[in-house]
Amino acid sequence: MKRILILGGGFGGVYAARTLEKLLKAELNRSEVELGLVSRDNYMVFQPMLPEVISGSIGIVDTITPIRRLCPRTNLYTRIIESIDLKRKRVVAAAGFGSQQLYLEYDHLVIALGNVTSFAGQPGLAEHALPFKYLGDALVLRNHAIHVLEEADIERDPEMRKSLLTFVVAGGGFSGVEAVAELNDFVRAAAKSFKNIMPEQIRVVLLHAGGVILPELPESLGRFAQDLLMKRGVEIRFDTRLQGATADAALLASGERIATRTLVSTVPSGPNPLVAALQCQKDRGRIVADAHLELPDYPGVWAVGDCAHIIDSRTGQASPPTAQHATREARCVAENIVASLRGTAKRRFAFKALGKMGALGHRSAVAEVFGVKLSGFVAWWLWRTIYLMKLPGLDRKIRVAVDWTLDLILPADIVQLRTDRSVGIRREHFEPGEVIFEEGGHGDWLYIVVDGEVEVLKRVPGASAMSLRRLGPGECFGEIALLGDHVRTATTRSVTAVNLLAVDREAFEALFSTLPPLRHFFERLIEERMALGERLTQADGTPSAAHRARAAARESASFR
Amino acid sequence: MKRILILGGGFGGVYAARTLEKLLKAELNRSEVELGLVSRDNYMVFQPMLPEVISGSIGIVDTITPIRRLCPRTNLYTRIIESIDLKRKRVVAAAGFGSQQLYLEYDHLVIALGNVTSFAGQPGLAEHALPFKYLGDALVLRNHAIHVLEEADIERDPEMRKSLLTFVVAGGGFSGVEAVAELNDFVRAAAKSFKNIMPEQIRVVLLHAGGVILPELPESLGRFAQDLLMKRGVEIRFDTRLQGATADAALLASGERIATRTLVSTVPSGPNPLVAALQCQKDRGRIVADAHLELPDYPGVWAVGDCAHIIDSRTGQASPPTAQHATREARCVAENIVASLRGTAKRRFAFKALGKMGALGHRSAVAEVFGVKLSGFVAWWLWRTIYLMKLPGLDRKIRVAVDWTLDLILPADIVQLRTDRSVGIRREHFEPGEVIFEEGGHGDWLYIVVDGEVEVLKRVPGASAMSLRRLGPGECFGEIALLGDHVRTATTRSVTAVNLLAVDREAFEALFSTLPPLRHFFERLIEERMALGERLTQADGTPSAAHRARAAARESASFR
């Protein structure tokens, strides 16, 4: 029996499985071939419709199709892949409910792992920017947008309010433009349900590194798109690069900072770590495949889609990372695997893109199809028709058609579904000179310095703040407010750029009360710091917050 | 200006706000009255339709309605309430994006906080049972059900497979029966898409403490319902109580254990901690309200819904905790607040329930309406009609009607939407004599003993396992596998009932590499334990897993 294993549940992987099921029907019936597919999720995301999840015009699950339905004769392993061993022809998948990993051996391997969001080299983005690639990202963004509207509606501080109502999207390519179009439509429609938010208070900004957006299309279509977006209230910043982020700002390369609580970054994508770890020929992180899409050094191993570097045999150009190409590559790979099994001739890959389309929301789009440029309603109609046809599965087609119909008559949905539960531990980034927390504020996090330097300041009546101490890597702060009364007893500010680990109250208490060395450490630390706090109190004569915290700490009987 | 503040976004709170908006239209226009409502979520869940979210026959967000749409003239504070101070007439809400809490002062306060799921007194339930009360619970249950099917489809161990395909629901009242009916329908329909799962391998069990299910209804309807469920493959265990749970079993009061990975508990509900903390008259945890639904000791403070103990002024009976009652109580409170403001007479609360209905899935239900008993299709038709009428908001009515129509023609959806991201830290419970992890297994968690005792065992070739040591509260184990190669170097087993804190690899590494005292502690601990492992190795002459782990630990340069 020959085992064919496919890695990845995107267009490349799923279409390879579908084609193999068709071509190997007889062999599958006789159990001469086994088909397997490993995917983190049990569904395939129909990427072109993802932006519409933001606005809720397509139901959350209607843009995705269960892989089992698309390739019913393939064994689906819904697991995370841990490693690929090309030498031993074996893939290891992570453990499920039990503690046993899964070892999958193969005769033919199709690598269709795509690429991943990567914020490397842009400080603060991993911590504070929202990526936009997976279904989960679209949901998180939607909920986040509703959350900031909720907060803006009741916020009294004008500066904070302004930053809550500012939405920044970085990247003027297809995905950035589609995301900003839907986000803009959505927040402006949703804001109508918030009694204290005026439409003119909402600011939606698109950052674009070039002079015209949508560089993938002819310039005239890019200009059409940007005029349309600007008319709808999107502020486009041309020749502008995003350099970094903090919890409350987008930092531009020019040094400017835009105060915002919502920063979406669609630009960076890097190789999947599994692909990066492979010992094979690569071109800028992508796996080099030959004209038959096979790896030169590993016969029987094939690569398709965004993770592969594939030269079109007709044009001599590298294939772009699009769904159109991935599905054609997948079919070619399937045919070539069958040819290998049967000993017939393999086919060389060649495909000419049919066209490109970008949706702009509100019944408008831009498209270039077979060299013809279209824009506005016609392009939008074409967009919907083509993608509805392409959407796999009849049930999905019906659901999306119904969603689109309802969307014409029903108001925007503003229900906030929280997908993020208590995290316990998170990372944060601060640029030099930023306040991490303010004396007298309310605190629910303990911070540990990973790198950089932090300064602890204490208010002095009638004078400027006094610097108590500086903290470096491995030192922590904020622990006092995690005891009795939640009040921050000092202000902390970053001296250099700082990376922090923040531990929330629940995680802190759980660890603290169970791990004796940790408890001893914090008991000693708190004792020292409170003694310092008390000396300060005696100096200025007023009972300090530290004093109250100390009393509270004493009451909380050995911190349990 | 008079400030009316409502706490809670369920039926009680939202209907109080709606009625107040109607009655106080003129005062709201003249800004003489301010209405506020504090709710954790920005939507109201229409509880009766929640079970249908499990099977996906109603879209995820269609059972819930944005509170802003229901009461557009009320200030909605989507925040968690931290405390209620009846003396100072002030409510404190948690901080949002900033670090400032929200202080809300009131002249009239409506407490409509419902009750919460409480697993107190049943060991292991908080850690391992799935509650079924909120929308999030329904989503988690749905995803979990799909996840176990995914795993069962590829599992090779027959015992594990059986436990993955066993679904247990505890509680034979309305919510338990509706949940088991939908869960049973869903897993049996979804299983058709899994090529390695046979329908007869699926086991769905309902645990019920009495002799006939649905004790809220006449016995004949309960019997009808249980016959129907059994015909559809639900195994009902009568006179059976759930006593506790572990990660892989439901523990019955009889001492029997049912191996399962899915245990749903609908029984326990306890008072909201905010209500428990209130200094006022209570009856079994519920706030005692007078005939006008006002608190005897606090004029201007009112209580409605499940958190209130309300005596019906006509029957002299306590009002049951149902939506029917909550909405009527809410209207009565609204009228009485208006009467207080205007100095007119207040009305006494009285309401006779119209009837009770329970859905059984698959076009069947049971109902008792105005004393008439109905079952089967007629009751189901009535159920859908009444609840569709009751569902607030025209857009929701349309969406649900469309969902129901599509559900008749389209197959069950098996897309698994993960709502639970990396948790970092979780709690686990084990009964005496259970294996926590097995030597040679794959490990991604470090465990800290909270209470109880754990034994560490080492395999000895040709003999029974040797007990290396016992660990008690504050001690930890499993740390070696979190270093280099993921392999458990020993087996651990609970000696007594044990509660553990489990820390995952990512959280461990983050804390470990940043907190020096923690690092020193673990470095010492690992050194000691590995030395012991090596002595054992020398005794039996084979290179042990501990040896390999030690080598790996040395390579990983001071654990960074």
Image (tube, coloured by chain):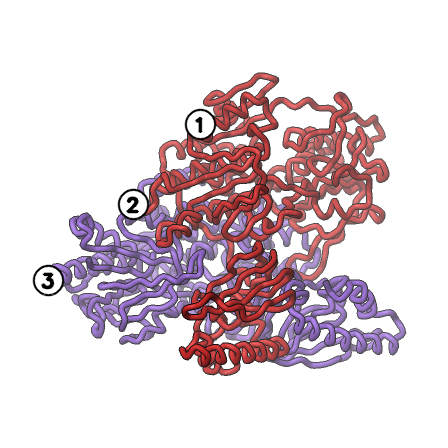
Chain colours: A purple, B red
Q: Secondary structure at mark 3?
A: loop
Residue toward you, A82 or A497: A82
Q: Residue furthest left?
A: A344
Where A459 falls versus A263 (above or below)?
Answer: below
Labels 3, 2: front one: 3
Q: Is residue A368 left or right of residue A193?
A: left
The local crowd at label 2, few if under 14, some if 14 to 19, many if 20 or more residues have their Cα within 10 Å, is few
Kind of residue at badge 3:
Gly
Residue marked by disc 1: B363
Q: Secondary structure at mark 1?
A: loop
Q: Residues within 10 Å of mark 3 (few under 14, many from 20)?
A: few
- Residue B521 placement, left or right of A87: right
- The residue at the point 56 percent across, 26 percent down is B357
Q: How many marks?
A: 3
Q: Chain of mark 1?
A: B
Q: Nearer the viewer, residue B26 or B211?
A: B211
- The residue carrying mark 2 is A389
Q: Is residue B488 left or right of residue A478?
A: left
